[in-house]
């Protein structure tokens, strides 16, 4: 597949995850499509519907005209309403309808990648909130989204895997980019504070969030001597916390905390960076 060099890592990651998702759902029975996933309010069918809906938007297809029921508790704002429309219109689709639409959508997207001559840095496309964003950022977010939802499906179906896939590396960078805001704004870490995050497992990395005298936080790959807080956890737990799939208290035994316990609790309470 020939794509612009700046898009290639994201297309590769997207392809790896979308093929894994297709392989996961093709053999499912009708009942398995209704299994709940860690994504709040969504079943296996809903997660796949969401993926189909956003990929169709990237193809330029019109959004469905649909009025949502009023009893969807996970729909709480304009963003979640926007995301729910392509999900709810497919809630009664059969397994065959779902897999057929997924496969055809993937074929269309792969054809789009092969034929796309647009400049990824300057071309604007529809973003996840319906706004216009650069094509390169859009593809990065799509690679992230399908990998996160692949993990939702794997958790629901009891088929773990791909924690070190190409999409995992994209997800690591996106989730880490939100960490300074978590520490400085969400947790209210005081000026001149350092917080160390030590993650182990299939993906291993150490990052320091440094809050300067003005209260601005930055991410630093070097360790800190005498940080206010050090958090050590495995990669799977980090993803599930940062993506809002679990609450801190449910994985407390998988997070080692050193330092200011009150600040650590505030950081973990605000750890989710996905909408």
Image: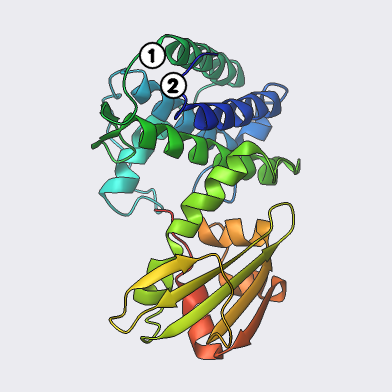
> In the rendered image, which quarter contains the N terminus?
top right
Q: Earlier in the sequence, mark 1 or mark 2?
A: 2
State whether residue 36 appears in this view.
no
The residue that label 1 is drawn on is 116
Residue 4 numbered tag? 2
Quadrant housing residue 65? top left
Discs 1/2, front: 2
With respect to residue 29, does 192 lie above or below?
Answer: below
Judging depth in this view, the residue of 65 and 267 nearest the camera is 267
Helix, strand, or loop for circle 1? loop
Q: Residue at x 29, y 41 (%)?
A: 129
Question: Mark 1: few, some, or many residues within 10 Å (few <14, many ≥20)?
Answer: few
Residue 183 position, x and y percent, is 43, 74
Q: Residue at x 54, y 90 (%)?
A: 260
With respect to residue 180, does 201 lie above or below?
Answer: above
- Using the numbered discs, state the Cα–Cα distance from disc 1 to disc 2 in whole angstroms: 8 Å
Residue 225 position, x and y percent, is 58, 84
With respect to residue 119, does 31 lie above or below?
Answer: below
Quadrant housing residue 99? top right
Helix, strand, or loop for circle 2? loop
Q: Is residue 164 left or right of residue 179?
A: right
Mark 1 and mark 2 in contact? Answer it, CB < 8 Å. Answer: yes
Residue 256 position, x and y percent, is 68, 78
Q: Residue at x 43, y 54 (%)?
A: 274
Q: Is residue 155 left or right of residue 81?
A: right
Judging depth in this view, the residue of 268 and 209 nearest the camera is 209
């Amino acid at each position: 597949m020939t794509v612009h060099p700046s898009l290639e890592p994201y297309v590769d990651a997207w392809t790896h995850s979308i093929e894994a998702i297709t392989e996961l759902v093709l053999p499912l029975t009708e009942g398995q499509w209704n299994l709940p996933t860690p994504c709040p309010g969504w079943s296996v069918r809903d997660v796949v519907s969401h993926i189909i809906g956003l990929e169709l938007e990237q193809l330029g297809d019109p959004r469905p005209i649909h009025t949502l029921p009023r009893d969807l508790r996970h729909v709480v704002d304009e963003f979640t309403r926007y995301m729910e429309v392509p999900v709810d219109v497919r809630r009664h689709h059969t397994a065959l309808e779902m897999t057929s639409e997924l496969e055809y959508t993937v074929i269309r997207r792969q054809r789009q990648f092969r034929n796309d001559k647009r400049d990824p840095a300057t071309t604007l496309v529809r973003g996840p909130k319906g706004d216009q964003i650069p094509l390169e950022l859009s593809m990065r977010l799509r690679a992230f989204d399908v990998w996160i939802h692949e993990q939702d499906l794997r958790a629901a179906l009891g088929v773990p895997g791909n924690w070190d896939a190409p999409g995992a590396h994209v997800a690591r960078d996106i989730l880490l980019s939100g960490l300074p805001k978590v520490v400085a704004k969400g947790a209210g870490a005081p000026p001149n504070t350092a917080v160390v995050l030590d993650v182990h497992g299939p993906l291993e990395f150490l990052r320091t969030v440094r809050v300067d005298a003005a209260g601005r936080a930055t991410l630093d790959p070097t360790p800190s001597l005498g940080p206010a807080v050090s958090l050590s956890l495995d990669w799977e737990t980090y993803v599930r916390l940062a993506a809002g799939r679990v609450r801190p208290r449910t994985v407390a035994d998988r997070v080692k905390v050193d330092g200011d316990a009150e600040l650590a609790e505030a950081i973990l309470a605000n750890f989710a960076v996905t909408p």
